[in-house]
Image (cartoon, rainbow, N blue to C red):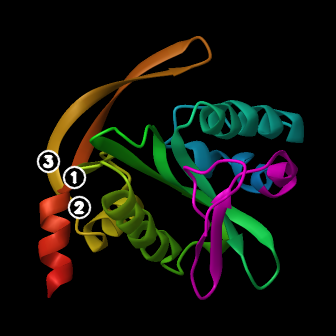
Amino acid sequence: MVDDTYPQMPIIETKNYLLRPARLNDAEDMFEYYKQSKVVEYLPMSSHKTVSDTRRFIKSFFIDNYNQGKIGHFAVVDKSNNKVIGNIGLNNVYKSDTEGEIGICINPIYWGHDIATKLGKEVIKFAFTSTNIKRIVANTYENNKRTRKSLKHLNLKYYKTYNKKIVKGMKITYVKCDSYRILKSEYIKINRK
């Protein structure tokens, strides 16, 4: 199914979840998790203080990029209650790009149910079958054990460690990060079995 407003962003449906483009009226649900410091701990941003912060974030990170024709993050909708419980996708790439970075953010209420892995598989499948992506990367802080586990289940392999510059407000720090990746050829080989 294709979204009429953003044709580069398909609507992906699984048994329990719907992946669709984010909307401004998702702000209340997204604020619920973006206001938590444990959610943004490994993101290059501060926790949101108001729903207006989240609305501005939706406009700049999601909608503005969709309007430029980029493939970005999908809002994750729990079909049982129509609630947005997270976002997952590629970090704003064009359909013609050959590399994309996957990003995942799930409301902590839903942690421990392996949602990131299940939906990550759907995003990787979409990227390798519907775009020009040949390599998907994921970058995570070295001490972020939870994400590392999910990346391994998605068949991404450790590639390298590097120092990432993080700017939060006026504070600049450098954090050791690990980079993981999977090539399209590896994905095809794994899924032939």
The stretch in magenta equals 1-29
Q: Is residue 128 magenta?
A: no
Q: Which residue carries the number 3 mark? A: 159
Marks 2 and 1, Cα distance to the nearest angstrom?
5 Å
Q: Amino acid at mark 2?
A: Leu
Label 2 with label 1: CB-CB less than 8 Å: yes
Residue at point 23%, 61% (across, down): 156
**Which x, y percent locates residue 22?**
71, 51
N-terminal of the pair, mark 1 or mark 3, is 3
Instruction: Give the secondary structure at mark 2.
Output: loop
Q: Which residue carries the number 1 mark? A: 181
Label 1 with label 3: CB-CB less than 8 Å: yes
Residue at point 39%, 59% (across, down): 130
Q: Which residue carries the number 2 mark? A: 156
**Which x, y percent locates residue 153?**
29, 73
Is residue 111 visible in the rendered structure shown here? yes
